Image (spheres, coloured by chain):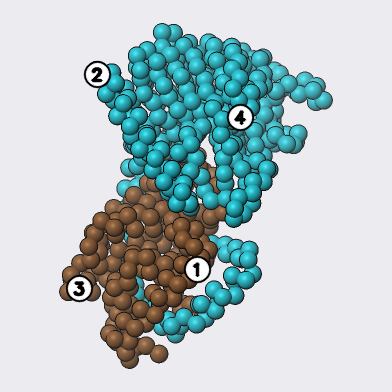
Chain colours: A brown, B cyan
Amino acid sequence: MMAAVAVTGREPLDELTLRRAQRGDERAWRALVERHQAAISALLWRLLVGRARHRVEDLMQETFVRVLRALPTFDPKGPASLSTWILTIATRLALSELRRRDPLPESEAPELACHDTPATTIDRRRLGEALARAVMQLPDGQRVVLVLREYHELEYSEIAELLELELGTVRSRLARAREAVRAQLAAIAPELVP
Amino acid sequence: MSHRAPSEDPSLEEPMLDDDARSPLVGIDLSAWQVPPPPAELADAVLARLREPVPVAAAEAPPMATSKRWRWLGLGAAAAGVALAVWGYTARPGDRAAGELVTGAAQHLELGAVRVDSDPGAELRWRRAGQVWSARQTRGAVTWSVPRGETLQLELGPTRGQEQGMTSGQRTTSGAMGLWTNDARLRVEVSMNRTDARVLTASAATSAAVALATVILYQGHVKATSGGVTVNLSAGDVARLVAGQPPAVMSRSVPATNAVVRIEDCDPGQGPLELYRSPNPGQPEVVAVGVYQAGGPLRFELGEESEPNPPRAKPSPPIAATCAGSRQTHHAARAGADLL
């Protein structure tokens, strides 16, 4: 199974708050943003790693502006949960951004990729940096599938829907992405790979 | 954690679980890759931006899925839209009143002498050609005030191109719906309502959606067209327009009161909401019909608000509201009271 990865922002907004947000209630808008901002921030950081770090904050704003403007049309009983719908909007903004930008020179990338806390152990820090670098090397199509599955726990079918891909394509991209990341990790920090 | 719907096809479920179980990343702590927390003022910045109206193109949420064929059609429709917009801006030098709007909050617009008050979520585009305002109200609720001497030609519901933005699993049925007036004050509510019909596509059975509009005419006169049939509406009429069907005039007896009845949190998913007087429980007289959209609010205006703080109407007759499909009364009050 997947490695244990903290996923935030996927608890559903309570129904009343969602209704109020759909009616334009600013307090409910704020609650919605605050509920989902951590997940969207993490998604954009990981998708844009090494490519457009300076655009993360702008795209976070843009994501929520679009979400809240389109919120009256969101159907809570529809095929997508609110969190998946928001992830869809953020992902498409990120992919659009990636299409406009070339990769940064590799020498600039590592310090952009990983955010440490004082409690971070040396090994964990090295693993984090190695993961960031490995994901950074992935083609966009593999990177987005890997991040959505491993860090946001979207179902394969949800990823296929979101990216407008066949289910088989999602599976094959994910398999290639996982292989590539493992190979990169083994090359960068072999002692950290079981 | 969001809900995880099980795959509808059991044959697909097991291989994907195997994919995860056999992942070469099993045993590697992926959470070691930490990223910075979001900025503290994100919500403030977002709300500040939302207080400004923006062009519709910048506010569209992407659809969950569209096929490549629809994508090309969408591009074609977008190109046609751009061409139309360019035409609108250039066809009459000196007359450049054209625009598009999605409202995140209630908005007031003045298009020349025509006043437009939109509810949150309404989507409009318009252009002026001579003395005629040509507009399309794609969704949401808008109150239009068209003074004598101005002409409004209003199309209702999404265009073909916009229909491609429906979420996967939904398909729409089309049919031109529109209004024409040169002297009226009216409220128009547009929504896409799912139907019980099942439409078989190449891949799956999907629910259908039809454009539905409710027109409440406070003053003046309006020609309403749908399903190829045009009817004349006069002050007090409430009409329901469904794509592909003739207009249905629901009421010609809206009481002349100053009441504004506001209903919130009615049980959703029940379709049109009816407001009625019920002197006789067996024969309720429907006085207004509204479209209930995912949480409302839904406002019935039963007459003109002639003063900033209009006096409440006389407390008779009783007014009640029901969700269509059931005669159970969810809220009840007298005219002039807020139904909350």
**Callout 3 secondary element:** helix
The dot on residue B17 is none
First along the sequence among labels 4 and 2: 2
Mark 1 vs mark 4, CA separation in Å:
39 Å
Q: Which amino acid type is shown beneath numbered disc 4?
A: Gly
The residue tagged 3 is A106
Tag 1, which chain? A
Mark 3 vs mark 1, CA separation in Å:
32 Å
Select label 1 or label 2 by which is in front.
1
**In the image, are marks 3 and 2 on the same chain?**
no
Identity of the residue furthest to the top in this view = B149
The residue tagged 1 is A168
**Callout 4 secondary element:** loop
Query: Do the numbered discs 1 and 4 sit on residues whose CB atoms are within 8 Å?
Result: no
Which image quadrant is residue B268 in? top right
The residue tagged 2 is B93
Tally of marks: 4
**Callout 2 secondary element:** loop
